[in-house]
Amino acid sequence: MSTIAFTKGHGTGNDFVIISDPDGELELRDEQVAVLCDRHFGIGADGLLRVVRAAAIDEGAEAVVSGVEWFMDYRNADGSKAEMCGNGTRVFARYLSDTGLASLNGGLRIGTRAGVKTLTRSERGYEVDLGAFAIEADDTLVRAKGLPVARPGVGIDVGNPHVVVAVASDAELEALDLTYQPVLDPAPRHGANVEFVVPADPLVQEGVGAIRLRVFERGVGETLSCGTGVAAAALAVRHWAGAAAPDVWTVDTPGGTLGVRVAGGHVFLSGPASLVFTGEVALA
């Protein structure tokens, strides 16, 4: 049994175990990641961020070609690999900056399974360019415990898959029991995160849209926040609102408020990132 160093961090309550493995020497099995993320028997987190040089991981080949040094190996709390994590990118950037491994001056580019992402500082803390997005033409029917009837949801791809559902009121949002996984029909091949959204009333004030949401993350369960889910939810409501909808949004999650803006065919996510504590843990 070996001992490894870790850092705990979060972005609006979406929390992560951060493991520094610059040369890619550490092979983490799914069950090991699950134990580290377990809130009763491990450190506790929604996911794990392994800090590894792009050249040291096979999935970092695209990043290496683009001249990117660092790769964010993101794993869900059950150990499964995920394409991307919006809150995770900000925490990852904060870790690289605070430890002196990289600088955000002029923008920091990092590799992910959803391609290279660029992070900069912003008035909310950090902003990440999530890249281009896609809105699916066909609805997905969503059933959830506490939702009176099944609702249509729109599929949004922002590097990882999401289905966004509008609910009628704050009361209906609060009544959802997300200890149970929502059922999607048709079921996406690789699963999807599911966001339940209530638009503000009025929806737009001074050119800025506002929404509130709760989210169920695949491989995790309900989380206090989901960065890519926040972006997907804003994009969905913007899509429903039509041509007059704004390009700038604020999104309230149980863990805090994040910003979303759309520009040049890309979606950008902004918000804080915190490093909470460091320690060592035995890796079974």
Image (cartoon, grey):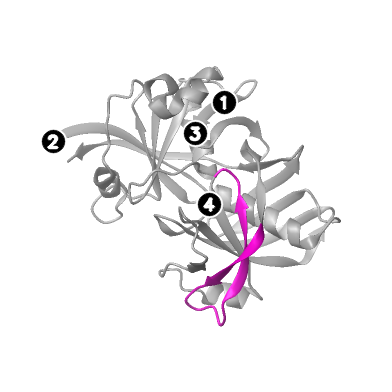
Give the residue type that dot 4 points to: Cys
Quarter of the figure that contains the N terminus: top left
Q: Which mark is residue 226?
A: 4
Q: Which secondary structure dominates the residues rendered in magenta?
A: strand
Specify which label sits upstream in the sequence, 2 or 3: 2
Q: Secondary structure at mark 1?
A: strand
Give residue 7's position: percent from left, percent from top. 36, 36
Mark 2 lies on residue: 1
Q: Is residue 138 magenta?
A: yes
Give the residue type that dot 3 points to: Thr
Q: Which residues are magenta?
A: 137-159
Give the residue type that dot 1 points to: Arg
- Kindly indicate whether the residue at mark 1 contacts the one at mark 2 (C-beta within 8 angstroms): no
Q: Mark 2 to mark 3: distance in Å?
A: 29 Å
Give the residue type that dot 2 points to: Met
Q: Secondary structure at mark 4?
A: loop
Q: Is residue 72 magenta?
A: no
Image-based side of 50 in relation to 130, left or right: left
Image-based side of 136 in relation to 67, left or right: right
Mark 1 lies on residue: 109
Specify which label sits upstream in the sequence, 2 or 1: 2
Q: Which mark is residue 149?
A: none
Quarter of the figure that contains the C terminus: top left
- Kindly indicate whether the residue at mark 2 contacts the one at mark 4 (C-beta within 8 angstroms): no
- Kindly indicate whether the residue at mark 3 contacts the one at mark 1 (C-beta within 8 angstroms): no
